[in-house]
Image: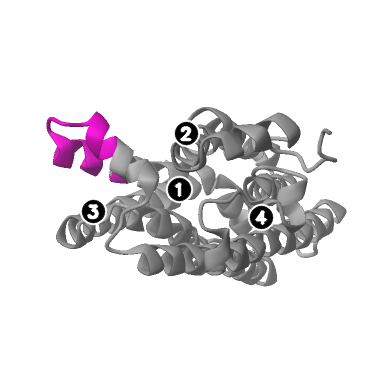
Amino acid sequence: MTFGAELWLAGLLAMLLVMLAVWLLSEWVANAGIVDVAWAAGFSVLGVLYAARGTGWEPRRLAWSGVVSLWSLRLAGHLLARVVAEHPVEDGRYRQLRRDWPERRRLKFLGFFLLQGVLDSALSLPFLAGCLNGASRASALEWAGLALWAVAILGEAGADAQLRRFKADSANRGRVCREGLWRFSRHPNYFFEWLVWCAYALAASAAPWGWLTVYCPLLMLWFLFRVTGIPLTEQQALRSRGDAYRAYQATTSAFVPWFPRA
């Protein structure tokens, strides 16, 4: 077994243990929403682990650790603030899962939490490739990836801040946010999140075999469109906002920011 595979398996084991602990905590506080926080924060754990134990050029390993941790912990902090503000009310997506899983609910939630740890590890391959890259200078691909990452994290943070300000105004209760980036996309936060993964894959492609990590933005796109992203979010929005959200769907791009339809 190569060192890269051993290091990835060590990261996978770490994430499974983290998610097991978070599942136990979620049972204690009766709020499964903390899995989102753990999923986001888990990438910083993997980034630091790969940087600490990787064999690549040290400045590159430190850069990967810093970039991944900055993005990961900002997102985790944003999600934690949301969970804390709404607790003990659980996110609507997880309340729906509790209704959908009337039998063996705890076991199914455990499987769901562990799956998030596996997903963290599966998506972490760009970080690993970068931390194993021994080239002693940054390439044009890595600089381009860093530039794209900067645009993406600013867009994601901006979209989160705009939605947070909108929700903080009690006059907006029950209304649909159409302010800032949300005027041009129903999910600008998801779009810029996906761009983050494009940036990671682009930077990782400078490493030997790093181009294979292109599957990460593709996998993230599939999850956003088919699994836990847009479908569950929009189902909850329709339950809570009804016709107002249907009108929003009819006029506003689902993903890529674009001018609204009349």
The span shown in magenta is 97-113
Q: Of the two numbered discs 2 and 1 on the same chain, state the one appearing first in sequence.
A: 1
Disc number placed over residue 162 in the picture, else none: none
Q: Of the two numbered discs 4 and 3 on the same chain, state the one appearing first in sequence.
A: 3
Q: Nearer the viewer, mark 2 or mark 4?
A: 2
Mark 3 lies on a secondary structure that is helix
The colour scheme used here is: one colour
Q: How crowded is mark 3: few (under 14 residues within 10 Å), some or many (20 or more)?
A: many
Disc number placed over residue 120 in the picture, else none: 1
Q: Residues within 10 Å of mark 1 (few under 14, many from 20)?
A: many
Question: Do the residues under discs 2 and 4 have CB atoms within 8 angstroms?
Answer: no
Viewer-proximal residue among 254 and 142: 254
Residue type, numbered disc 4? Asn
Q: How far apart are marks 2 and 4 (CA)?
A: 43 Å
Disc number placed over residue 133 in the picture, else none: 4
Q: Distance between the residues labelled 4 and 1?
A: 21 Å
Rendered position, 105 above or below 55: above
Q: Which of marks 4 and 3 is in front?
A: 3
Tell whether position 72 is magenta: no
Say which residue label 2 marks. Answer: 235
Viewer-proximal residue among 209 and 212: 212
Mark 1 lies on a secondary structure that is helix
The percent position of residue 167, horizontal first and vertical second, equals 55, 62
The percent position of residue 137, horizontal first and vertical second, equals 80, 64
Q: Distance between the residues labelled 4 and 3?
A: 35 Å
SS assignment for the magenta stretch, majority: helix
Q: Of the two numbered discs 4 and 1 on the same chain, state the one appearing first in sequence.
A: 1
Can residue 111 be seen here? no
